[in-house]
Image (cartoon, rainbow, N blue to C red):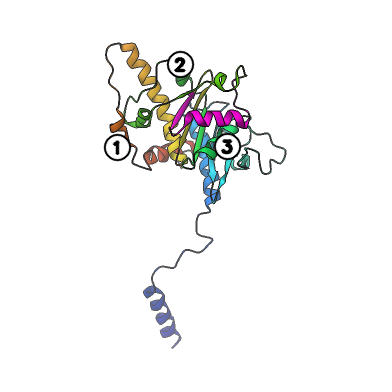
Amino acid sequence: MRLWLCALLACLVTMSGPALPTAQSRPDPMATAVADLVTANRILAAEGILDGLGHVSVRKPGDPSRFLLARSIAPELVTADDILEYAADGEPIDAKGRDSYRERFIHSEIYRARPDVQAIVHCHTPSLIPFAASDVPMRAMYHMAAFVADGVPVFDIRKAAGVTDLLVKDAPLGRALAKTLGAKSALLMRGHGAVIVANSIPNVVGRSVYLDLNARAQLQAIQLGGKLTYVEVDEAKLRMTDPNEYSRAWDLWKRKVSGGR
């Protein structure tokens, strides 16, 4: 009798279908965001986009008025314990005595101005510096950097604040930068570096890597001389419809920085 009851219960369980995931088995959005942010720091350092300086952030899951950003530390060294939560004004919620990046207002003011932006990179990538100091505009060289075809404006801090140390270290300067960025995906900073935005961490990492490669390719093409043909806006728009354009590259980069795991 007991064996018959056990068999009946097993049959009922099988017929009811797979068990629904419990609360414990569901991914924690906050933990996932922190892990991806740490990974993004490591990838951008490994790919030469960030060195000892620069930073990457993401909106806080469940509260778009806040964002996550590491404490002031070299990107390659970032761990989950280094991630701080920031309010909309760019001030940490609980720094616990840890220093913040002085240019965190780049992030806070872009998030204020651009509800569509979910992740931001600020970098000093060497290949981008010449284009920020020149009247030669960045143009899209190939499909992987199609977003460049939409235009890459240059932020000159002198126009916003006169003579400064070239750092965006307060909210008014952050707002001026966000205004120059407008609806674009990237912006160059004269005498400084660049800012890249996207709808996710994988995409902002992808755009940052391919913006660097695009700049190098454009410089090489200019050195060749002759007439250049760029990716046009109508072509770029067809490429930019994929919300996960860089997912394959992200998986590869993530595997590399995690030691192949």
Quarter of the rendering containing residue 242: top left
Which range is magenta? 166-188
Tell me the element at label 1: helix
- Mark 2 or 3, closer to the camera: 3
Nearest to N terminus: mark 2 or mark 1? 2
Q: In the figure, 211 relative to 57: above or below?
A: above
Q: Which residue is disc 3 drawn over?
A: 108
- Mark 2 or 1, closer to the camera: 1
Indicate the position of residue 187 as horizontal and vertical percent values: 47, 27
Tell me the element at label 3: helix
Q: Quadrant of the N terminus?
A: bottom left
Amino acid type, mark 3: Ser
Residue sitting at x 57%, y 37%: 108
Mark 2 and mark 1: span between their CA atoms? 29 Å
Question: Within the magenta stretch, is there residue 238?
Answer: no
Nearest to N terminus: mark 3 or mark 1? 3
Give the class, few, some or many, for how many residues have Cα within 10 Å of label 1's Cα (few <14, many ≥20).
few
Amino acid type, mark 1: Leu
Q: Which residue is disc 2 drawn over?
A: 130
Amino acid type, mark 2: Pro
Tell me the element at label 2: helix
Mark 3 and mark 1: span between their CA atoms? 30 Å
Indicate the position of residue 236 as horizontal and vertical percent values: 31, 32
Indicate the position of residue 104 as horizontal and vertical percent values: 60, 33
Q: Which residue is disc 1 drawn over?
A: 238
Quarter of the rendering containing residue 166: top right
Nearest to N terminus: mark 2 or mark 3? 3
Mark 2 and mark 3: span between their CA atoms? 27 Å
Give the class, few, some or many, for how many residues have Cα within 10 Å of label 2's Cα (few <14, many ≥20).
some
Please say if the residues under marks 2 and 3 sit with CB atoms less than 8 Å apart: no
198 vs 172, left or right, is left
Residue placed most toward the observer, 65 or 182: 182
